[in-house]
Amino acid sequence: MSAEPVRKAPPAVSNEAATDAAPLAVMSQGGASADDYNEDAIKTLKGLEAVRKRPGMYIGDTDDGSGLHHMVYEVVDNAIDESLAGHATEVRVSLNADGSVTVADNGRGIPTGVKQDDDQDPKRSAVEIVMTELHAGGKFDQNSYKVSGGLHGVGVSVVNALSTWLKVTVWRNGDEHHMEFRDGVPVAPLKVVKKVKDKRGTEVTFLPSPKTFTMIEFDYPTLEHRLRELAFLNSGVNINLTDARHADVKHQQLMYEGGVAAFVKYLDRSKNPLAPQPIMIRAEKDGIVAEVALWWNDSYHENVLCFTNNIPQRDGGTHLAGFRGALTRVINKYADESGIAKKEKVELSGEDSREGLTCVLSVKVPDPKFSSQTKDKLVSSEVKPVVESVVADKLSTYFEENPKEAKLILQKVIESALAREAARKARDLTRRKGALDGLRLPGGLAECQDRDPVNTEMFIVEGDSAGGSAKQGRKREYQAVLPIRGKILNVERARTDKMLSSEQVTNIIAALGTGIGRMVEGQQGGFDVKKLRYHKIIIMTDADVDGAHIRTLLLTFFYRQMPDLVEGGHLYIAQPPLYKVTKGKSGTYLKDQRAFEDYLINAGLEEAVLITGDGSERAGRDLHEIVENARTFNTILDSLHSRYARHIAEQAAIEGAFDPKRLESADIATKTAGEIAARLNAIAEETEDGWTGSYGNEGYLLKRMLRGVTEAHALDRALIASIEARRLNDRHAHLAEVYGKMCKLRRKGETVDITGPRALLEAVYEAGRKGISLQRYKGLGEMNPDQLWETTLDRDARTLLQVKVGDVMEADDIFSKLMGDVVEPRREFIQANALSVANLDV
Amino acid sequence: MTNITPIQREPLCSICGRPMVDAFKPFCSAHCSNVDLARWLGGVYAIPAASADDDEDGDPPFAPPDR
């Protein structure tokens, strides 16, 4: 109300040109009587008549409420300008109970003076001209962005023309002026009502005319939304919105410092941002000001709001095109340079960079062009290159200066691209199969004859030669074979990585017939376990590290992408043998190291008797248990740190030296040390004894002189306090009973001295090995088809491990650690768990 | 073997680490599931061979558990 007329008011009393700073007429003059006024008003009415005839052209849609609310914005706009110019500190908007709206500011007040060069007689006040003449003033002045933007460009006179009544009060220079209009026609000229002290500003109250608007109820949320927008776009402006229509008066203060960045933060107030602060771009080029705030959050929705001279463009336009172009260009460049796009084998599209992006893009353009009256789309072509170059420039700089945030953003973009790509491929894979109802099966698959999934099984076999053997050895009636190859990837340095190629994965999906991807409601496709073509899927890999890796990959894939298959109990692991033991004419397949040891123990204990120190004989099941105990003992011993001598620790355990009670008294501990030494001397060769034992701060210390060199072994406190020592000590009673005094193993006429569990185990293994020949299969390929059949494929002879969810979760966990980005923990993990990966017994 | 890190059983999304959502398990969303799928279909996932980068700190190369 105030600033606008300041600019647009034609020369005032003083006849000076009206500019922002121009001094304005001070006094209001009474003017003509009410009657005269009405006659002259007819001329004015002609202009406003045009507005009433075609209100849509001036104020927007009169039926859907948008025009109605524009009435308010038109008046508010002027108040905001007065604020921005520093003349007002507050803008008040109030919805009144009678259906009218009041918009007020505490600015300078609309000039009240009589315009001396007015073409009407009697000459009218500036207030009256502003309220009754279209385009009164400098709306199209190229120097001010504001004036050319909105629907508001038409001026407050349009609001007057479309109101049943309008009242304006101006406080200026100590006077309160008042004027009222009905259907745009002044009821009386502007007059001073009273003197006021320290009050200035303008207040306009109007009741929209039902003759124009079919809908005359103001919607509070609509107003709140737009006024909030204005408060953000005009940083620091203080807007107070009141809804006084109901018994419960609603009030809201809208005031924000921080501009578009604050706007973006407000929009994302309940989201999780990727970076701590929005990226803020502000630049002016070729007379166009661009202000952009960008912020990515972890959602998948794009929310970009565009404004030109504070007016929103629902459909974007040239500013948005420029922004998008720059964003895509900068992100693609960064993705290429960092190598991540290549690593992830993905191509970025523009939409990927905008997933999860919240952005407010505000431009100030002199004389902007829009595609329609409603200004939903900006078409000014000069805006695009400016926004594009400004955004590209500043965004590149931001990425350079904030590598951490840039990486997070890029990761997000890459993932969007991956997800988009996967959704497309999944659709293709699912559709490809359904299109021709003949199934498109992968080339390498050897299909079975039976078509009933309940009866059939499919082996996923690693390696071509193993695949060949399996194809020959299988029962083709119900067993299908899909050979896959774990591709070896040469990565940096000498490192070789194991992977499943894209083709292998696609083949597996095609062979299973289930489709892939998440089933999304209302959409076709996705993985469907009901379409599974074989009810048993059996993974068959070599029993070596590579095989374990391929198996880990497969398990992880099934767990992540086909969890229903795992939960349905359809996934199995074949147990091909690791050894074949032949004794005489009979052959035995053994699946792993443990089974081999079992075999050796059984064979070695045939006819064996253990004679303990007290002369009692132990044999049969009793002896078997003793050997099993020795085996467990040996495992614990092996798990000790390599700095501890195994044979010393063994004898110490038999002696009971790991009992913490022995350490409570130095005397007992010293005595124990002596006894360990005595045991060592008893089992040592005659010339190599001479062990002495002592106990001190370091724990037990055992020494001997051997050919002039002192050999010393410590069983220190760290060891004695360890869990392994406790576990060794738990077996003390048994150890003392069996090995306390020297014992002997007698078997088939031969007798061997047994000094402890390790010696017993060794003697039994040794005996078991006699007369056998051992074949170790390094891979499935080493077995011929018949062997593969009788060990692994034959339903009646094989053992299959059914994969449980817990197993695949573990595989996933190992996989995640192996895949980890951080090199150090990954290497540690590989080294620490090399054994467990190889033995991954699922 | 004795210093294996305990396996974490908290159900977290394998891609983004947010809590897993049952309908999309073991992920939190169709989006993350698709990110994973893209990596399978693109042949991106590769397990580093175990004998990998051991030359750097002189640790003995890992050998299969043969006695």
Image: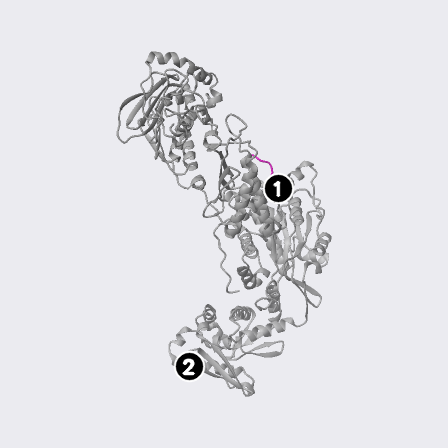
**Which quadrant of the structure image shows residue A697?**
bottom left
Residue positioned most to the front? A15
**Residue A565 seen in this snapshot:** no
**Which quadrant of the structure image shows residue A765?**
bottom right
In the image: residue A12, left or right of residue A785 = left
In the image, the segment drawn in magenta is A522-531
Q: Position of residue A73 (x, y in %)?
A: 42, 28
Give whichever of A141, A58 is nearer the camera: A141
Query: Image quadrant for the N terminus of chain A?
Result: top left
- SS assignment at label 2: helix
Residue where numbered disc 1 is placed: A426
Chain label for disc 1: A
Number of marks? 2
User: What amino acid is found at the position of numbered circle 2 in the picture?
Assistant: Thr
Q: Position of residue B33 (x, y in %)?
A: 55, 45
Using the image, determine if residue A75 lies above or below residue A777: above
Give whichever of A733, A525 is nearer the camera: A525
- SS assignment at label 1: helix
Q: Looking at the rendered structure, which numbered label has been put on residue A263?
A: none
Using the image, determine if residue A276 lies above or below residue A490: above
Mark 2 or mark 1, which is nearer the start of the sequence?
1
Using the image, determine if residue A247 lies above or below residue A300: above
Q: Position of residue A69 (x, y in %)?
A: 42, 26
Local crowd at mark 1 within 10 Å, few (<14), some, or many (≥20)?
many
**Which quadrant of the structure image shows residue A68?**
top left
Q: Position of residue A521 (x, y in %)?
A: 55, 36
In the image: residue A200, left or right of residue A782 = left
Residue where numbered disc 2 is placed: A670
**Residue B64 seen in this snapshot:** yes
Q: Main secondary structure of the magenta part?
A: loop
Asked if labels 2 and 1 touch by Cβ distance under 8 angstroms, the answer is no
